[in-house]
Image (cartoon, helix red, strand yellow):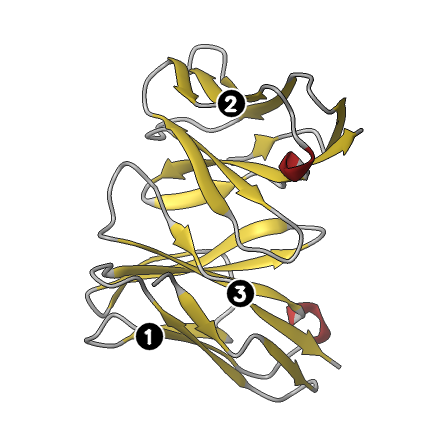
Amino acid sequence: GQSLEQPSEVTAVEGAIVQINCTYQTSGFYGLSWYQQHDGGAPTFLSYNGLDGLEETGRFSSFLSRSDSYGYLLLQELQMKDSASYFCAVNRDDKIIFGKGTRLHILP
Amino acid sequence: TGVTQSPTHLIKTRGQQVTLSCSPISGHRSVSWYQQTPGQGLQFLFEYFSETQRNKGNFPGRFSGRQFSNSRSEMNVSTLELGDSALYLCATRSFPGVRDTQYFGPGTRLTVL
């Protein structure tokens, strides 16, 4: 089978750094993506890792290690507007498979 | 303009059928459909490209779709069940490819009573 595992919830403090992990039991996929979804909104694309290593986009960074079947999304300088759900996803056989999402709570 | 979906909300009863619509970003020819529920997250239904279904998820045959020559897509659910209550999202991209950057519409909230 194929699945992606993420923590269901993470809590962090405004201004801090938080890491959301994604582990997977699937092979032969092309890359790992991350999406953000605010309550009542549509998922929006954040980042993509086609190769192992770190990709940085402003306050957000994403990492992939295929040998460890592991990736993460790193959010720095947390702001209240970052309160949302975050999904990792892989493209395998041209089907995009999503994790069940991590709800990020930010405390003032 | 972004991806648009209609209607935004829909209430149906068991046994009825429903048709949802998705209009992609101009130039996008690939349209995928997802079902989102609190328990199961985002689940892939199917993807259409150039009016042909390219891929299909693990949903029963009650779920079907089609794509028109202008890339607009519709999905249909027949014989509705209570468990079909969900947010239905479509996502579009220029064409199917390795880098899976998709753009999601706002979704249609379907409630089955």
Q: In the rendered structure, are the residues bearing label 3 and label 1 in contact, judged by CB atoms less than 8 Å apart?
A: no
Q: Based on the displayed image, in which of its 4 quarters is residue A73 positioned?
A: top right
Instruction: Single out the residue that lies furthest toward the right.
Output: A107
The foreground one among B47 and B72 is B72
Numbered circle sitting on residue B107: 3
Judged left or right of residue B89, residue A50 is left
Mark 3 and mark 1 lie on one chain; the one further toward the N terminus is 1
Image height of A6 relative to B68, above or below: above
Task: Measure the C-alpha gap from mark 1 to mark 2.
Answer: 39 Å
Chain of the residue where label 3 is placed in the rendered structure: B
Which residue occupies 39% across, 63% down?
B3
Q: Which residue is mark 2?
A: A59
In the picture, the quarter occupied by the C terminus of chain B is bottom right
Which secondary structure lies at badge 3? loop
Residue A65 x/y as whole percent:
44, 13
Q: Which residue is mark 1?
A: B66
Chain of the residue where label 2 is placed in the rendered structure: A
In the picture, the quarter occupied by the N terminus of chain B is bottom left
Type of the residue with mark 1: Arg
Which secondary structure lies at badge 1? strand
Type of the residue with mark 2: Arg
Count residues near mark 1 (Cα–Cα under 10 Å), then give few for <14, some for 14-19, many for 20+. some
Image height of A76 relative to B58, above or below: above
